Image (tube, grey):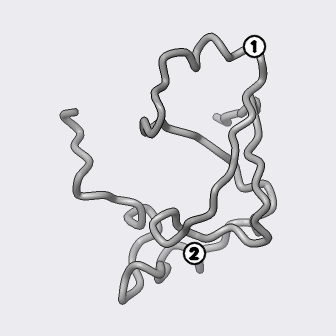
Amino acid sequence: MGIQMKPIGVVNTDAKEIPRSWKVSDVEGTLVIDETYLEGLKDIKPDQKIYVLFHFHKSPGFTEQFMRIKPPIHDKKVGVFSTHFDPEWSLSD
């Protein structure tokens, strides 16, 4: 089984390098969404958190060396899928 993604927009930024984590970044950018989807953006409030699924199209291919990494916000290597857990998030929200 495969999953295909169809882009509905792009992210624009003047940044020369994109940080590995938003927790250690002040880089700002703009989401540019295809007009077909504008109705779905109504009622988003300033500073409201939203989910943005994205694809790093310039990233190197995946290898097993990336299964455990040392993010800038940790003092040791951790499993890659645990790097963006936020204890303030709740599955019951």
- Mark linked to residue 66: 2
Which residue occupies the extreme left position in the image?
92
Q: Position of residue 83 (x, y in %)?
A: 41, 67
Q: Specify which label sits upstream in the sequence, 2 or 1.
A: 1
- Work out which quarter of the rendered image holds the N terminus and state it: top right
Lateral position of residue 16 relative to residue 89, left or right? right
Residue 86 in which image quadrant: bottom left
Label 2 vs label 1, nearer the camera: 1
What x and y, as percent, mark residue 80?
47, 68
- In the displayed image of the protein, which residue is found farthest to the front? 46
Closer to us: 55 or 29: 29
Quarter of the image where one finds residue 78: bottom left
Residue to which mark 1 is pinned: 36
| Above or below, 26 relative to 37 | below
**Mark 2 to mark 1 CA distance (whole Å):** 36 Å
Label 1: element kind: helix
Nearer to me, 64 or 24: 24
Tell me the amino acid under the disc marked 2.
Answer: Phe
On the picture, is 61 further left or further right than 77?
A: right
Residue at (47, 81) in percent of width and height: 72
Q: Is residue 25 above or below residue 44?
A: below
Q: How many marks?
A: 2
Report x, y in % for residue 75: 36, 89
Q: Quadrant of the C terminus?
A: top left
Q: Answer with left or right where residue 51 lies relative to residue 40.
A: left
Could you tell me which residue is drawn at 56 percent across and 66 percent down? Answer: 26
Q: Which residue is more in the foreground, 37 or 6? A: 37
